[in-house]
Image: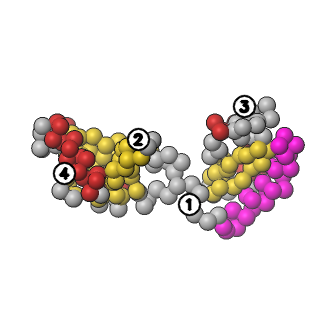
Amino acid sequence: MIGFSESARNRIKEFIQEEGDDDLAVRIEVLSSSPLAPEYDMALVGRDELEPDDRLFEADGLSVAIDAKSASVLEGTRVDWIETVQGSGFKFENPNLKPIGSEPITGPLTDRVKQVIEERINPGIAMHGGNVTLVEVRDDVAYLEMSGGCQGCGMAAVTLKQGIERMLTEEVPEIQGVVDVTDHSSGANPYY
């Protein structure tokens, strides 16, 4: 179900030793399965702290508990311990949660969304030095990245909801929503 790298396993065993209780389990829960920023919770728990629906099993020499809702999302996940100059921590490599933009953007629905962006949206926001790029269409949601004058602009959210999303959902009814995946904090020269 879930595996641990040697460094992750060793680090968890160090944490267990620090707690002084060899009967602790590693409890893992998926807090958010968002493809933008999946969130996990991992904690050492005693057997008396397990939830009734937790699934308890052994993996790579560790007792592991996973809540029932997270079990299918965590299937095949590998946990690693990484250390970088920015910090250290556990990294989840989850084959079930593909990050936005990791798949090629092809297909008839994608082509129609791109056409609306190129022909209707970008000409309008180009007057403000902005540009919109389609990152992915997933589950009837268009994930977009804004650049130029739109990146960091205080009005980007309004432009997205009242302009871009309205145009896209009118022109391509299969699209049920639009999500901005832009890092607006790094915008250097917004229009407003």
Give the magenta-colored segment's residue range: 106-129
Local SS, label 3:
loop
Residue 58 marker? none
Residue 16: tell me if it is visible: yes
| Mark in the foreground, 3 or 2 | 2
Name the residue nearer the viewer: 90 or 37: 90
Assess whether mark 3 and mark 1 are in contact (beta carbons under 8 angstroms): no
Report the residue marked by disc 1: 102
Tell me if mark 4 has few (under 14), some (14-19) or many (20+) residues whose alpha carbon lies within 10 angstroms of its own.
some
Which callout, 4 or 1, points at the residue further toward the start of the chain?
Answer: 4
Give the amino acid at mark 3.
Gly
On whether residue 108 falls in the magenta region, the answer is: yes
Please identify the quarter of the rendering in which residue 129 is found: top right
Assess whether mark 3 and mark 4 are in contact (beta carbons under 8 angstroms): no
Identify the residue at image location x=31%, y=43%. 42
Name the residue nearer the viewer: 192 or 28: 192
Identify the residue at image location x=41%, y=57%. 94
Which callout, 4 or 3, points at the residue further toward the start of the chain?
Answer: 4
| Mark in the foreground, 2 or 4 | 2
Tell me if mark 2 has few (under 14), some (14-19) or many (20+) residues whose alpha carbon lies within 10 angstroms of its own.
few
Measured Cα–Cα span from mark 2 to mark 4: 26 Å
Residue 154 marker? 3
Local SS, label 4:
strand
Give the amino acid at mark 2.
Gly
Tell me if mark 1 has few (under 14), some (14-19) or many (20+) residues whose alpha carbon lies within 10 angstroms of its own.
few
Report the residue marked by disc 2: 87
Which callout, 1 or 3, points at the residue further toward the start of the chain?
Answer: 1
User: How far across and down, in percent of the image, does residue 124 sit?
Assistant: 85, 46
